[in-house]
Amino acid sequence: MSSLSVRTRLLAGCSVAALILGAGLAGAGLSGTASAADDPGASSTRSVFTVGMTQDIDSANPFTGIVAVAYEMFQMEYPTLTEYSASDFSIVPGLAESWSEAADKKSWTYKIRAGLTWSDGQPLTAADAAYSFNRVINGQYERTNYGSYVGNITKAVATDATTLVLSVEKPSPIMEKLLVYIIPEHIWKSIDEKAIKSYKNEGTLASPTVGAGPYVMIERRVGQFIRMQANPNFWRGKPAVDEIVFKIYKNQDALGQALKKGEIDFADSLESNVFKSLQNIPGITTVSSTYSGFNELSFNTGAALDDGTPIGDGNPLLKDKALRQALGWAIDRDALVAKVLGGSGSPASTIVPTMYAALHLDPANPVTYDPTKAKSLLDAAGYAVGSDGIRADAKGNRLSFRLLARSDSSGGASTKAAAFIKGYFAAVGVEVTTKVISSDALTEIIGQGNFDIFEWGWVVEPDPNYQLSTFTCANRSYVDGGSTYANLSDSFYCNPAYDALFEQQGVETDVAKRTAMIKQMQQMLYDDAPYILTYYYDNPEAYRSDRFTGFVPQPAPKGSLLFQYGTWSYENLKPVSEVTATPESPGSTNTASAAPDPGTQPESTPSSSWGLIAGIVILALVIIVVVVVLAQRRNRDLDVDDDRE
């Protein structure tokens, strides 16, 4: 990792003496405090919690971003009507304090909390909620991420400042689970349908994003970090931690070392070897959390627009269900769990993960690792082995496919999995050429239909309606203004029988009947094999327990500490120094992390007492060297090396 120059700070509004003392303390590496100069109304110290991760967000715009880390930012900034509880995913009040269905089953009424304000001080009312829902209902681009929630909603009306009424075509089982972010109308109304596609929504210190969640964005440097500042107007109260920083590292070793050195406070999605290296270190706690994600191989089953118009250059042989089914038997899922995940997961089958036991389906005909059976099925489907060892159909079309993996997957898991898949397929006479690209590039390629197979994954909500919607015909790519845009469907699977079941479960309010439909849909997808699921993964996490406390797992007791359906941990985090005043030993790091420029890192971390001494010495010399020091400080601040490995 390259050496980075001195931390930058905003210096406006401070006295000369305070400036020099602050510079001395920062230069000495005193942790647990940060300059309050960027907030004249703040106290003299700020607590900062730094999260290390290996993937950046793809967009700060909630209508554009699709990766899980982006949704972490969205839910920190924007509220929803209801929320999933931390304990067991049960529904609890969010922006709406209560809700009810009309007697005629044609509408739902949500009572919005009174007296709320956005982070900029503007009133937050039911009108903002109505605007947010109508924007998704009426906008094509906006429906990509949130259309599955509003498919049955015809309109949203604010009858007064605290009353939102959603009209529905039919009764719906998901009206208590509408994860549509409520955005400020006074900000977004000026961003039209055309502009929204390129709108970045990146806050700055001078102009933070306007939200109503516990935090709002104040800075982003692509590929380096994102800074989130506590929202004093958050309806559950301003969080105890003043700032959350998400710092991006390009490899897992650097991530682990950063936690050991105290450069970060939390490390997410750790590789097995890095996770193990962090165990039994004083001040660090490791947790292997259960999670709701799966990874898969997705096949191009016949790329087309939502109106059925073919697009892309996918290999047409993959339209053959028999071929896709046979390839499922060629994959050693147990080996992938062991070698890619280091054992932190389990072999996957159907698209609702096992952690949602009531809705998960154990398939009737489980596909296991059996290369001999894979060969037999390929033979039966008419794919004979050629002289070069590669199978072909009766017309001589070889089973030769492109496999795309993601360069920015956590711990390089996608690249590793792709290498194994290539070998598994080669063993049964199927040729694979792998290519590693970024998630952003892959999203673009998928939307155009220019692929054969790719490796990716999903994080599944407690209610699977959203996940089920990704396989519907209507969620294939679409054309707008002459350009083709990706929708939620990435395999281009289109089955009218599946669509009919999706519509039925979407209006079935009897829990047992709806559960049966959801399981039937899982079996249908398992049999048709637009995806071959590889594994369900755990989420190995580690954090500086000598600095922060208050983490809330979701679900209890062994769920994830961060990257949840909600912001429970962020709201409850507290620096250890605020919980207990236990004296520190010299050189300890038993405090909350400091708030330097997140793009920089200290080369060493002297003890806090040495930092204080250095600060006092500098203060004593201030009258003699003030002009020189200020000039040097200015020059150093202008010379910040932001490179990161």
Image: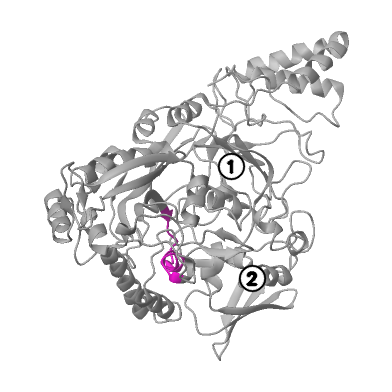
For residue 237: magenta? no
Q: Residue lying furthest front in this view?
A: 395
Query: Which labelled disc corresponds to residue 316?
Result: none
Q: What residue lies at 63% left-to-right and 36% top-to-bottom? A: 48
Q: Tell me the quarter of the picture where residue 190 sits.
A: bottom right
Instruction: Give the percent coordinates (x, y) of residue 481.
Output: 64, 63
Q: Secondary structure at mark 1?
A: strand
* Badge 2 density bin: few <14, some 14–19, many ≥20, Cα 10 Å: many
Instruction: Depth check: give the residue in front, 167 or 135.
Output: 135
- Sequence-wise, the earlier of marks 2 and 1 is 2
Drawn side of residue 606 relative to residue 445, left or right: right
Instruction: Give the percent coordinates (x, y) of residue 619.
Output: 80, 15
For residue 460: magenta? yes
Magenta region: 458-473
425 is higher (above) or lower (below) than 98: above
Q: Is residue 279 visible?
A: no
Instruction: Give the percent coordinates (x, y) of residue 299.
Output: 35, 56
* Badge 1 density bin: few <14, some 14–19, many ≥20, Cα 10 Å: many
Q: Secondary structure at mark 2?
A: helix
Drawn side of residue 484 relative to residue 502, left or right: right
Instruction: Depth check: give the residue in front, 459 or 373.
Output: 373
Q: What residue lies at 39% left-to-right and 53% top-to-bottom? A: 293
* Residue picked out by circle 2: 133
* Residue picked out by circle 1: 574
Q: Residue lying furthest top in this view?
A: 624
Q: Residue lying furthest bottom in this view?
A: 104
Instruction: Depth check: give the residue in front, 473 or 74.
Output: 473
Instruction: Give the percent coordinates (x, y) of residue 580.
Output: 57, 36
Label 2 and label 1: CA atoms lie apart by 34 Å
